[in-house]
Image (cartoon, rainbow, N blue to C red):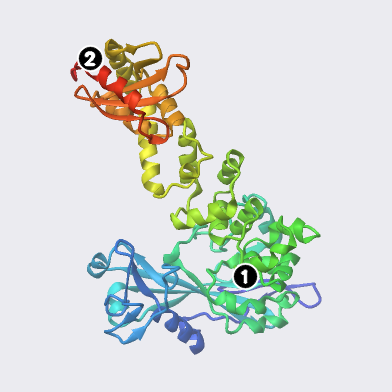
Amino acid sequence: MYGTQLKYDGSFKNVVKKSPIFWKKNVDIPKNIRKFIDDFSHNIILYDRDNDSYYCSCCLNKLEDFYCSECNKQYRDLKHNPTKCSDVIDDVYSFNKSSYFVRRYYFVFDVVDSEVILYNIVEEHSREIYIQFHRSALSIKNAYWIRNDSIVDLITNNVINFEDIDKQINTIHPIFDFLFIDFDLDVNLYDDYSCRRTLYVDNLDILRDTIYKYTNIWDSKEFLRDYDFRVLSITYIPLRFKQFEYLIKYKLYNLAFEAPHLLTGKTFKERFGVDKEFLSFMQEINIDYYELLGLQLSKCKNKYLLGCIGWEYDIAVELFKIISFNMDEFGKFLEKQSINRIPEYFDYIRMSIELGYDITDKKVLYPENFMQVHDRLFLQYEILKNTEIENSIKSLSNVLGFNLYEDDKYIIFPANSIESMIDEGSQQHNCLRTYISSYGNNECQIYFMRAKSEKDKSFVTIEVRNNKIVQARARFNEEPSKEIMGILRKWERTLLLVETE
């Protein structure tokens, strides 16, 4: 029978059918819940990803400072979180021409005989209805009966015991999963923003006389208003982990709803992996689990840095083995350069090392235009691995050997490999690496001037084009002395023309 459960009677002798009272139809949804959904929908705007612009979802008018002049309405400022209360689209033009479909999920609690029923309400509508009427169709997708030892799906009568959930939890990697378990098994573990799950919290206090009486979950009411809700957070975890209440008391709400099962131990340091002196900072930013991992690694009070390294924990560990950072300085650099992915920076450092750059030099460690430098370095790195260019440089150097110069004190000879050019650039602190491709294609010729007594030590780097010296630089790109330039001009007059072929 639809929505009935088998249950022992009071004497525990006979099995009887019990039909819990729950909303069976859409018309059963209370008016205050409908108003909450309508208000939430009405505050959702369109975010045009390509143009980084916001549009009114009612009239498609472009917003100025989140104000719609057409509807005379002020929306919430979403500059720091464009996906919050917004639908992310590729561009407003395609949105206007398509039959765009919106679906959202809302969760509401009700209490029946001191037992909790959790409703999953679906709101869906086509683009035309959305824009013209700002109306949607509501339906009750699921109803879950939350008991002391299990959760019952009142639509399918499927029973999920907490001990079975324990088994599932033990198979999930604690660092990379926030333990989102939806008891509708057809739903993917990872829902994107288009399937946002919003919790109605105005009735949260009614949980005080239920199995939640051993928690202080209602103290997190304001936090949950804007929280990207996960079913597990408010059903299973509060009932099973004493750490949950501990975290709520500390006002560490993100940790309470994401990772109480991970924060075990007796002392503060055992639970969080950092000293208690960081508690006020953790409360100030309402630290989440990945930020906590970042704090454990860096011991730095920079929220941006914590998020970057926490999300890429394993790569950050490897990076910190290579370089001992001033964490405050590193965090400011990442934020200024808008670097939010540590793998890109780690890749940059790895290439810098292989190309012979001095990573203790702050200009190398913190380049002014990171992405441009990263891309240029990648090109150099690809050239380094290109055997054709390497062979071309070796062949060209054999021909340029005819331009060898030697006197009592100095010798001038051509670069004969990519490795020799990288070494020259490292010793001289110049950008010779960027000339590898040009030299390999004979667009220019590169020579080294050395003291005969120190042939392995860089002295002057020379670029020649059309048998003319176009550049001659000593260390740190300084001009050579008049004496050296006199020798170079004398040598220049003896150069043999090298044809491209």
Left or right, 244 with respect to 37, comes to right
Relative depth, front residue between 57 and 344: 344
Residue marked by disc 1: 284
Left or right, 501 with respect to 125, comes to left
Give the mark toward the camera: 1 or 2.
2
Q: Which mark is residue 458?
A: none
Q: Which mark is residue 494?
A: 2
Which residue appears at 30% of the width and 68% of the height?
A: 100
Relative depth, front residue between 501 and 239: 501
Which residue appears at 39% of the width and 27% of the height?
A: 384
Element type at mark 1: helix
Above or below residue 369? Residue 407 is above
- Locate residue 501, reporting x and y percent: 18, 17
Above or below residue 381? Residue 43 is below
Disc 2 marks a residue whose amino acid type is Thr
Element type at mark 2: loop
- Locate residue 294, reporting x and y percent: 61, 54
Relative depth, front residue between 467 and 307: 467
Which residue appears at 59% of the width and 52% of the height?
A: 327
